[in-house]
Image: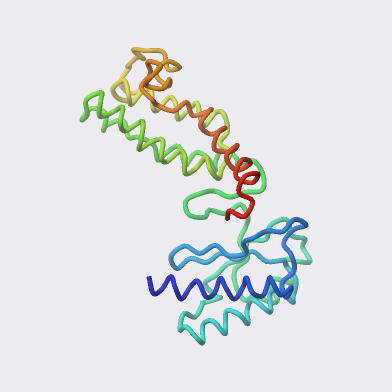
Amino acid sequence: MLFILVMDILNVLIQKASDEGLLQPLARRPLQHRVSLYADDVVMFLRPVASDLNLITEILRVFGTASGLKINIQKSSVAPIRCSEEEVVAIQQLLPCEVADFTCKYLGLPLSVNKLAKFQVQPILANQLPGWKADLMNRAGRTVMVQFVMTSAIIYLAMAVDLPAWALKAMDKVNRGFLWRGRLEAKGGHCLIAWPKVTRPLELGGLGIHDLKTLCWALRMRWLWLKKTQPDKP
């Protein structure tokens, strides 16, 4: 908790610099957050101009001197997002750290300004329900695993990433195979009930397992609803 309280000062310093107009705006529309803090991981969003880069370097130096939490710039990296070659060269001259490619991975999520490629989504599919666990559970246990364990992982992904249709179909296939005792391709099993019926709510005769296509659509629409109803929400 003490660490979190101290790290929040870094966020306040950068926000103060932004409010005072010392940092150039990131976009035409005002963006509320320039910093993402998670444990000892810090991500900052800046314009690739000398004044902003020099100011942030000085803020980090002052923060490190006051708190003792000095940032090792050599172990940090910069990920240019839609930057020109001249801007990348300026970044390399002003910041003595690695210039990494964007798309990047942050908190387990692949981030990109473009549609994710298949090779970026496939590692997500590899971390799904292992078929061998299905043989150790009864059907009620397998249903709970699909309802909550699998769905919670999908919600975390789908809130930030627009998963392609082929990925959702692959996840549905894993869910069906796990629910009806093991992976379909490994066990030769078959669906006892049509999947659209399984994904109905309990009060409509289903098992309450989410339809992934509808779930992902709802999570994306949620951001638009929050933007309209709670415009100050982070």
Residue 25: give x, y in percent of width and height. 74, 64
Q: Which residue is drawn at 42% across and 38% down?
A: 126
Q: In which quarter of the image is the C terminus?
A: bottom right
Coloring scheme used? rainbow
Vertical relation: 148 (above or below) 110: above
Q: Quadrant of the N terminus?
A: bottom left
Tell how many labels: 0
Q: Which residue is drawn at 53% across and 28% down?
A: 214
Q: Residue at x 57, y 85 (%)?
A: 62
In the picture, measured across the screen, residue 89 lies left or right of residue 10, that is right
Residue 216: give x, y in percent of width and height. 53, 34
Residue 165: give x, y in percent of width and height. 57, 29
In the picture, measured across the screen, residue 26 lies left or right of residue 43, that is right
Q: In which quarter of the image is residue 201?
A: top left
- Judged from this view, the residue extending furthest toward the front is 229
Vertical relation: 115 (above or below) 197: below
Vertical relation: 158 (above or below) 73: above
In the picture, measured across the screen, residue 107 lies left or right of residue 223, that is left
Residue 107: give x, y in percent of width and height. 48, 54
Q: Nearer the viewer, residue 88 or 21?
A: 21
